Amino acid sequence: MVFFCRAPIEVEKRVTIRRRLFYGFILVPIGLVTLGVLLWGSYHPEPLEVAIGGSGVQMGAQQGSAMSTRIRLLAELYVHRIVCQNDARLIEAREVKALKNLESWSPRYRDELVSMGNASGVSTGALAYANIFLDLGNVRAGCRSVVISATNRFMHAHNLDWDNLGGLGRWTTVIVRRNPADGRFKTVAVGFPGLVGALDIINERGIAVSFNQLGIGRGDVREPVLLMIRRIAESCASLDDARAEILVAPLGMPFILTVSDAQNGTASVFERAKEKITERSLSKGWVAACNQAQGSMPGSTHLDQVLADSVIRTPSDLKRVLAVPKVLMACNIYSVVFDYRENRLYLASGQVPAAELPFRSYTLFDETRRSE
């Protein structure tokens, strides 16, 4: 007699199906999460680019509306939680100082800041403090800047080396194109949302200015240094004009300003330590600065050494220098090259360190950019 038993086979099939379902429920989400992490890590957000114009009030409203989310995030997550340690009393005290300093600003810039705060939903005190906390000595940062004059090329470059802005470093780079209605020069600035001043800026006449920190501010602020940089770019048509403004700069924090004049092919680094300002001029085809005092003599930094050993004829050559391991800092938020003679802006951002990324290319000014 022969007996046929199908039950064990059916049981085994059911067990196999359950196993597949079980592993499917586990592995599929894990795979999706892994894929999402890989895609997220490889995504490099583009800088936000805005064009604004008109009066100070109009430009403030335009910038505040275009950048409202980013301005609020930086004010609340970085300035309040990181810089001010989320201490309500400290936040209030520092904003009171900022509002007091705001009274000394030129009305055109003060009105612009107030208008930007209203449009973005950030209080005037918080936005004013975000514009001067460097001058008050609450943060330290580094930077690398260089101007190259080689054959017919003239390029001004800067690595902005900060911290990661409370995790927002990949998302905070902005390009602001300003066209004031009161006769000031058109400018293109690269920096953070909410800045009335500038970290890197170039005007329609080819005057570019970049900021490197030198030492700590002591809180005695007449004119915030980033505001001074923008004022210089909006009013100076040559390096001589800029030098005249810098040498009589109001008392304030130590600074290093790299200033270039693309039309005349000249450039200088200006260092202010205490009340003394030292100028270091372009020599042997370049001038450079880090965040340390060098006086009038180059050659002491890794950047100087790399430049001395390099042949730089193109923007690609310069970008490679900015990414050399001895030059590039891990906290590099963006890397910018102004190539005025070719009317190009090159910018790497969206990753920290940014200079390891390919640079995006932009037009600097329209065809009527020069008011010569």
Image: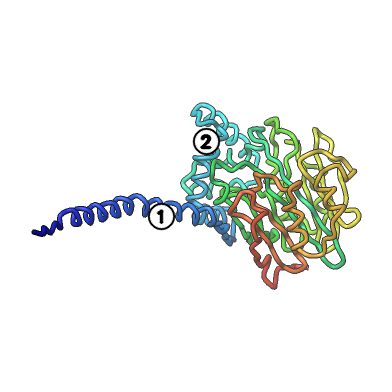
Give coordinates of residue 360: x percent, y percent.
Answer: 64, 63
Give coordinates of residue 21: x percent, y percent.
Answer: 28, 54
Which residue appears at 23% of the width and 54% of the height? 12
Give coordinates of residue 273: x percent, y percent.
Answer: 80, 35
Q: Which residue is mark 2?
A: 80
Q: Are marks 1 and 2 in contact (CB under 8 Å)?
A: no
Q: Which mark is residue 20?
A: none
Which residue appears at 66% of the width and 38% of the height? 134
In the displayed structure, 192 sits above or below 252; it is below
Q: Secondary structure at mark 2?
A: helix
- Tell me if 235 is positioned left or right of 51 in this view: right
Judge by depth and name the residue closer to the eye, 21 or 362: 21
Quadrant of the image containing the N terminus: bottom left
Q: Secondary structure at mark 1?
A: helix
Q: In this orientation, does residue 72 appear?
A: yes
Specify which label sits upstream in the sequence, 1 or 2. 1
Crowding near the residue tagged with mark 1, few <14, some 14–19, many ≥20 C-alpha atoms within 10 Å: few
Q: Which residue is mark 1?
A: 32
In the image, what residue type sits under mark 1? Leu
Which quadrant of the structure image shows residue 363? bottom right
Which quadrant of the structure image shows residue 358? bottom right
Crowding near the residue tagged with mark 2, few <14, some 14–19, many ≥20 C-alpha atoms within 10 Å: many
| Residue found at the very far bottom of the displayed protein | 367
Judge by depth and name the residue closer to the eye, 235 or 253: 253
Give coordinates of residue 186: x percent, y percent.
Answer: 68, 61
Which residue appears at 68% of the width and 39% of the height? 141
